[in-house]
Amino acid sequence: MSAQRYFIKLSYKGTDFFGWQIQPYAITVQEKLKDALEKLNRGKEVKLTGCGRTDTGVHASAFYAHVDFEEDPFKGFMDKDTIVHKLNCMLPASIAIQNIFPVYTDVHSRFHATSRTYHYFIHQDKNPFQADTSWYLRKDLDLPLMNEAAQLLIGEKNFNCFSKPITGKSTFICDVHFAEWTETENGYQFTIKANRFVRNMVRAIVGTMIDIGLGKTTLKEFEEILASQDRTKAGKSAPAQGLFLAKIEYENHPEINLNAKI
């Protein structure tokens, strides 16, 4: 039997994890999912790749990964619903599988993604049930001014000023398609969509824009921060708990059928 690749759609609450990617001496989402897949694969090792990375404490309401099996362990034995159920039974409550489906072996969950959308949530009234999934910030913000700043992010630009240091060869160029602040029932939501993001980019943008909303930074200063390509010029990063990876799109790849059945 030939090798088989599957796409997996999942969501997770990142509070108890040191991000997505496996790392020594730390509990990660990738490690937990890999362990569960290997149990289903009768103890044989699998290769698991995510559509991106999330940092410690960051959540994902939609995340895709692909897994490679040397031999397909499911074909003719289990249907999709059974596989999803078995995986969910083995995983902690903070990780949930929504779908799993076969793809061609050259289809890649990370490199074939055409856009990613993040949401950042802020609540203004202290709420113990939102403490892990939103930033508690009592002060009112100037949303119209923050949205003027958000429009300055649109387009293909160098976002080094909002990035953690990156070792090795990489690029800070991202193409931002959409950025907007909106009011919610008990606070604010920031939505940003781009082809890619550099490390810590969304949290650094949110933290800097909060300074604009509080009158600490002007639009002209925000433009200067963008032009500087200097992280020390931007504001502090917003806390991790308010950030969600919300949507991954594969628009230019019709062979990735996100509604496929096994």
Image (cartoon, helix red, strand yellow):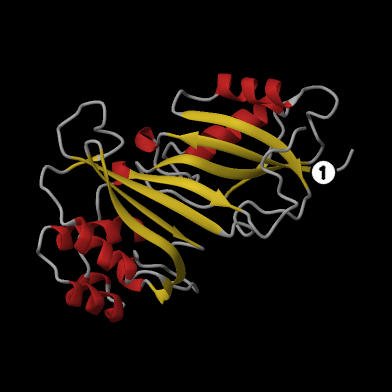
Name the spot of residue 18 as percent of width and height, x first. Answer: 39, 42
| Front-lying residue, 228 or 164 | 228
Q: Residues within 10 Å of mark 1 (few under 14, many from 20)?
A: few
Which of the 4 image quadrants contains residue 192? bottom left
Name the spot of residue 239 as percent of width and height, x first. Answer: 25, 47
One can see residue 77 in this view: yes
Relative height, residue 230 to residue 112 (above, below): below
Which of the 4 image quadrants contains residue 59? top left
Q: Residue at x 53, y 58 (%)?
A: 115
Relative height, residue 40 to residue 180 (above, below): above
Residue that mark 1 sits on? 3
Relative height, residue 157 to residue 26 (above, below): below
Relative height, residue 137 to residue 180 (above, below): above
| Front-lying residue, 171 or 116 | 116
Q: Residue furthest front?
A: 144
Q: Amino acid at mark 1?
A: Ala
Which of the 4 image quadrants contains residue 89? top right
Q: Residue furthest right?
A: 1
Quadrant in the picture for the N terminus: top right
Q: Residue at x 46, y 69 (%)?
A: 174
Q: Residue at x 60, y 56 (%)?
A: 113
Quadrant in the picture for the C terminus: top right
Q: Residue at x 70, y 20 (%)?
A: 82
| Front-lying residue, 68 or 259 | 259
Name the spot of residue 33 as percent of width and height, x first. Answer: 56, 34
Circle 1: element type: loop
